Image: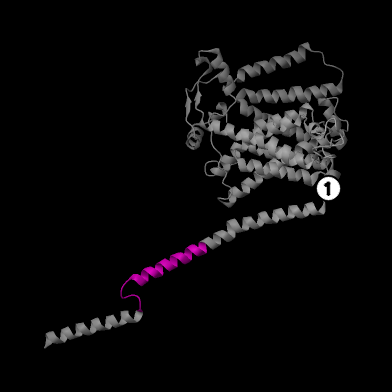
Amino acid sequence: MAKGEWKRSGTDDIQLTGRSECEVFDDGTNTFFWRAHTVTVLFILTCALVYVTLLEETPHDTAYNTKRYDWHAVCLMFMGKCLSFAAYWRFWLCVSVVYELFLIFILFQTVHDGRQFMKYIDPKLGVPLPERGYGGNCLIYDPGHPADPFHNIWDKMDGFVPAHFLGWYIKTLVIRDWWMCMIISVMFEFLEYSLEHQLPNFSECWWDHWIMDVLVCNGLGIYCGMKTLGWLSMKPYQWQGLWNIPTYKGKIKRIAFQFTPYSWVKFEWRPASNLRRWLAVLGIIFTFLLAELNTFYLKFVLWMPPEHYLVLLRLVFFVNVGGVAMREIYDFMDDPKFHKKLGQQAWIVAAITVTEFLIVVKYDPNTIMLPIPFFITQCWILGIVLILIWTLWRFFIRDITLRYKETRRRRQEGSSERDRVPGHADGSNLATSGRSKLNGSMDTVRHRKS
């Protein structure tokens, strides 16, 4: 959470600082980077509209005017309004709203119109593109090519290798848990195995799945991410106003740190602690996997090449909104009494993920409905059944068994304590003792009378 977002209210400061594992020192200076600029932004937007109205000649091109209205006027006006009242992370919340509105617009179009509308963004789009397959010859050492027997490995070394590493490095910073990252990484490889009959891009060699992806790219990214998390949890957080820093080097460093977290909180998911957290973790994993699949399916149905800048912009977008959304989900799950509602960014990210999937279903239902091979279906059914069985055992059967054992143990302890009390072990002894005491008292009375 950035500094501008942190200063929202005093109660937030108290609550989140109590859960933080690091001390934060802040001189309270309201710097330019997170102070509202309502009058400035209003003046700039007004000047832009005056220029378009009085000084610029309107072209006689309906398509161009529509494009300029949609993207320049509406989007820039909305983003300018958001920037005037908020800081960096609120800006990405506004970007999320604009992106969701764009997705809904695409969803409401016909398949042909939606694909051709992409030409307004880039004239090179709107053309069907063949999907590249990474399978085929899976020999690590190919003796048939004596000049370069390792050519299969070099062919896989494209721009997606560093993208895999960087992507999982950032995902680790977002999730902040080694086990959950590894589960998502392995599960996505199983999804690629399961869906390679739908998208040729999922067809990869076994060593490309498990060695290059899981172990090298994803594993190295997760490892570096965990090391960075350890550094972030131990570094001091000292915030000082920009104009209070004497050196230019310090000012530049302060500007760069403005886009880092204001403080640091370690995520402890503890999925097996209760049923609510377990279901929440399952939902997070499912949403992550669905968002990953949407990346490939959206490229396929909207005819966008993998190296197009829109694909990169979407990944940059999810990097910025994913961290805030995950923090809001963790707060909502970890402290439901204080955070009674799901955060705005988490809500809009979930809506975006669902809308993207609906676009895929509408634009190419034939590909989505291709039947999964029977043996793969059996494997997924077996996995789901095992998860259900473990859930029932861990949160229902095990709890009932533990309560029964605890109740039985308490009863045994109570009976053993009663057995230790003298004269109370047998009811007959108690009755005999009572009669003897009564006879003794009667003899004493007779003796006094005589």
Residue 353 seen in render: no
Q: Main secondary structure of the magenta part?
A: helix
* Magenta residue span: 403-426
Residue appearing at x 69%, y 32% in the figure: 165
Query: Whole-percent x and y of residue 360?
Result: 80, 40
Q: Which residue is mark 1?
A: 369
Residue appearing at x 81%, y 26% in the figure: 121
In the picture, measured across the screen, residue 381 lies left or right of residue 433, that is right
Dot 1, crowdedness within 10 Å: few (<14), some or many (≥20)?
few
Frontmost residue, 43 versus 428? 428
Frontmost residue, 20 versus 183? 183
Residue 206 seen in render: yes
Tell me which amino acid carries mark 1: Met
Frontmost residue, 96 versus 195? 195
Query: Whole-percent x and y of residue 152?
Result: 81, 35
Q: Is residue 417 magenta?
A: yes
Question: Residue placed farthest to the left in the image?
Answer: 450
